């Protein structure tokens, strides 16, 4: 009896073991292609392949060099979006498998970003993927990869700007720190204002400065990916706290949402159009604006590059891969801050800072990790709109003035 049981268990083990071997052997290669990111740091391809092996199949992605860093990525296959963002960013995972439906004619679009020379091989095979526990062996949970963290610091000054209808001036300093990790971002902004003789001002209490330090903390998330063919979606959401006194942070919440569609007229962002809308809300204001952008030669190493639209435009000329001269125009840029309970201009009110600005920048990239931007700005419109509790407003305008902007960025 024991012999029969032993033979039965041995037979069962052999069947299970060899069934896995047969399973693996049954997967036949249908189609494969390797995609490499060039100097533009973006690769986009739209291809198709035909086969008579119709039915359930497996899409296998393999990183050719795991040491090279990817950025974003999506695959659009036979009408379905396959997100590969997490796989690309996981430096411990080199293979990704996904069950797909193979048709006689198969169309796919691949969109990946990353370092120059980074390559990804796609292979379609017959049959379903291996069991989840086998796929899991190819992936490991990872901590935050600091090589994907980018930081930026900036400082600008608008010195001795004349206040309209006032025989007085003010100077505005602005500090900003900004950090990103993959699709996420966050930062802190400080607007620091110094005044001349406040006794000469026609607003405020003539004893205290109308305002001095305005703070803003913000965090956001953005994403972009294919929808079909040459069409892509983009979305950018941000929440922030903007206040004069930290005790009022709970009254300073504001949200911003930007989204729309992008059409790639030419691949690799040589020529593209973005269309959409922007939504803003806080306790004092609800604002909806159109968004439009036409971009040209975004990643070219040399020559003319442009991104023209509303509310922001950049037109530049890349003298070399590391040096660019650029004109920046920013329209309808505004932020609303909660004022303190004892603010002399508008107690427990709000202050909106509105700006239209043109600036000429010289951008210099010292390496792949460090860049510097120096610029001279011309403020076409610079207004401060104070709101009281009843939402009645008082506007303080500045005459046109010239300022200085300096930015430094670092890729950790």
Image: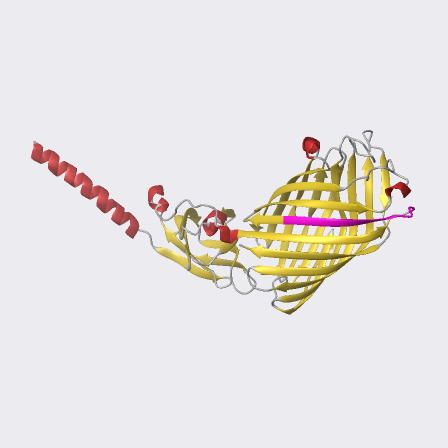
Q: Main secondary structure of the magenta part?
A: strand
Q: Nearer the viewer, residue 95 or 65?
A: 65
Q: Nearer the viewer, residue 362 or 21?
A: 362
Residue 367: quarter of image: bottom right
Give the colour scheme shown: secondary structure
Q: Is residue 255 above or below residue 138?
A: above
Residue 366: quarter of image: bottom right
Residue 194 picture location, percent across and down: 79, 46
Whether residue 266 is visible: no
Name which residue lies at 62% across and 42% down: 219
Q: Nearer the viewer, residue 297 or 301?
A: 301
Whether residue 164 is visible: yes
Q: Is residue 170 magenta?
A: yes
Residue 202: quarter of image: top right
Relative side of 385 to 214, left or right: right
Residue 376 picture location, percent across and down: 75, 60
Residue 271 picture location, percent across and down: 64, 61
Span of residues in magenta: 165-177
Q: Is residue 152 magenta?
A: no
User: Looking at the rendering, in which quadrant would you find the N terminus?
Assistant: top left
Name which residue lies at 60% across and 51% down: 232
Residue 8 picture location, percent across and down: 14, 36
Question: Number of numbered discs present?
Answer: 0
Name which residue lies at 67% across and 31% down: 250
């Amino acid at each position: 009896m024991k012999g029969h049981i032993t033979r039965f268990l041995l037979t069962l083990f052999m069947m299970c073991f060899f069934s896995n071997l047969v399973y693996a052997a049954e997967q036949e290669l249908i189609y494969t292609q390797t995609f490499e990111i060039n100097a533009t740091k973006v690769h986009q391809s739209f291809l198709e392949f035909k086969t008579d092996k119709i039915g359930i199949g497996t899409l296998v992605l393999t990183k050719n060099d795991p040491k090279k860093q990817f950025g974003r990525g999506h695959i659009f296959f036979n009408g379905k979006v396959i997100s590969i963002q997490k796989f690309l960013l996981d430096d411990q995972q080199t293979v990704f498998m996904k069950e797909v439906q193979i048709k006689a004619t198969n169309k796919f679009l691949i969109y990946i970003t990353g370092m120059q020379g980074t390559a990804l091989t796609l292979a379609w095979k017959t049959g379903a993927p291996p069991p989840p526990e086998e796929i899991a062996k190819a992936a490991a949970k990872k901590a935050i990869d600091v090589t994907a963290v980018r930081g930026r610091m900036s400082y600008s000054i608008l010195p001795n700007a004349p206040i309209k209808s006032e025989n007085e001036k003010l100077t505005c300093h602005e500090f900003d720190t900004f950090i990103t990790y993959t699709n996420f971002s966050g930062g802190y902004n400080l607007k620091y204002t110094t005044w001349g003789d406040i006794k000469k001002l026609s607003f405020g209490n003539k004893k205290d400065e109308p305002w001095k330090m305005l703070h803003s903390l913000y965090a956001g998330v953005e994403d972009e990916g294919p929808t079909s063919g040459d069409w892509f979606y983009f979305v950018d959401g941000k929440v922030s706290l903007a206040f004069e006194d930290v005790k009022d942070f709970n009254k300073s919440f504001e949200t911003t949402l930007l989204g729309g569609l992008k059409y790639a007229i030419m691949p690799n962002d040589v020529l593209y159009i973005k269309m959409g809308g922007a939504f803003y809300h806080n306790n004092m204001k609800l604002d909806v604006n159109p968004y439009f952008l036409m971009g040209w030669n975004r990643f070219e190493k040399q020559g003319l590059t442009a991104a023209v639209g509303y509310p922001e435009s950049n037109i530049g000329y890349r003298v070399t891969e590391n040096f660019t001269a650029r004109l920046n125009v920013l329209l309808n840029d505004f932020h609303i801050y909660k004022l303190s309970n004892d603010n002399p201009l508008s107690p427990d009110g709000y202050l909106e800072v509105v700006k239209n600005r043109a600036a000429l920048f010289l951008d210099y990239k010292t390496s792949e990790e460090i860049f510097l931007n120096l610029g001279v700005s011309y403020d076409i419109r610079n207004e401060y709109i104070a709101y009281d509790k009843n939402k009645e407003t008082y506007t303080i305008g500045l005459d046109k003035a010239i300022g200085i902007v300096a930015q430094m960025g670092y890729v950790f």
